[in-house]
Image (spheres, helix red, strand yellow):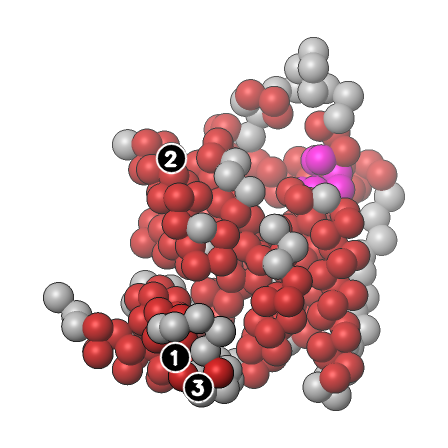
Amino acid sequence: MTSRDELRQKGAAMREKLGFPPNRDDVDIAPGLHRLAEEMVWGSIWARPGLALEDRMLAALSAMTSQQRMPQLRRYIGAALHIGIPPRTIQEVFIHCGLYCGFPTILNSVALANEVFAENGVEVPDTEMPDLDADALMALGQETKIKLHGDRAESGYAAPGHPMTGALYPAAIAYGYGDIWDRPDLDHRQRCICAVASFTAIDHLGQVAKFGQAGLNAGLSREQVKEAIMQTAPYTGFPRALNALVALGEAWD
């Protein structure tokens, strides 16, 4: 078993890699809090194998934007830039999670990101967005939905002609799968990480299971999906992450 000293050393190295300043015990806001963060957050979670550092950052940003943890999100936007994640990719994480958590979260988080970019002298490049007509957008949405979900693409609330969801779900197909899932600067594999982390953060277990499977279809391994869920634990709570892992395991059995 890894000792606490070893975890602390791993955690300090990870914290430095992300560009966060050294912990100072003389300004600890509560006794031992820095040491706890060094061991639990950085040493036990961030330093785990099984998921690349950039992917862990996508999951962490997704969890924090989904619950609008704005002071912490500001710091992690800076850390994301520090490890080389492009500003447009950061924006896209927030746009993608807004599909699940509401449009106001997009406005809040993208505005915050743009402030951090400006403070760091980072320019956001222009990106050409596809301009599809309504029929083409719906066709692309259907194609992406089937690619991600396979045989489950038209089950449950997604069933065509569903008496309760039939009036709303077409908008989800067109603007969710057709627009957001196919925007540039974040690919389907990365978007699955964002989706799984976001659904974990807002405790939507059925969606965790559904998009955990979609992650496999988009190129993630089972281990990577599990790690994306685990990555959310320090930011939105261990109970949510543990419940999501159980739901995912039941879906995979």
162 relative to 80, above or below: above
Left or right: 2, with 249 as reference point = left
**Who comes first in sequence, dot 3 or dot 2?**
3
Going by the numbered disc 3, the residue's amino acid type is Asp
Q: Which mark is residue 247?
A: 2
Query: For the residues carrying marks 1 and 3, which lies nearer the camera in this image?
Result: 3
> Is residue 225 placed above or below 244 in the rendered structure?
below
**Element class at badge 2:** helix
**Chief SS of the magenta region:** helix
Q: Is residue 166 magenta?
A: no
* Residue positioned 57% across, 62% down in the render: 61
Residue 99: give x, y in percent of width and height: 68, 45
In this picture, which residue range is highlighted in magenta?
172-177
- Residue 240 at what x, y percent from top left? 44, 43
Q: What residue is shown at x 67% (from left), y 58% (from top)?
A: 94
- Left or right, 121 with respect to 195, comes to right
Looking at marks 2 and 1 on the same chain, the residue that comes earlier in the sequence is marked by 1
Rounded to the nearest whole Å, what is the CA distance between mark 3 and mark 2? 42 Å
Which kind of residue does numbered mark 1 sit on? Met
Query: Residue at 60% across / 74% down in the picture?
Result: 75
Whether 234 is drawn above or below 3: the answer is above
3D distance between C-alphas at marks 2 and 1: 30 Å
Badge 3 density bin: few <14, some 14–19, many ≥20, Cα 10 Å: few
The residue that mark 1 highlights is: 14
Residue kind at label 2, given as amino acid type = Ala
In terms of image quadrants, where is residue 45?
bottom left
Percent coordinates x, y for residue 162 in the rendering:
66, 15
Which image quarter is the C terminus in? top left
The Cα–Cα distance between marks 1 and 3, rounded to whole angstroms, is 21 Å
Residue named by callout 3: 26
Residue 14 location in percent, x, y?
38, 79
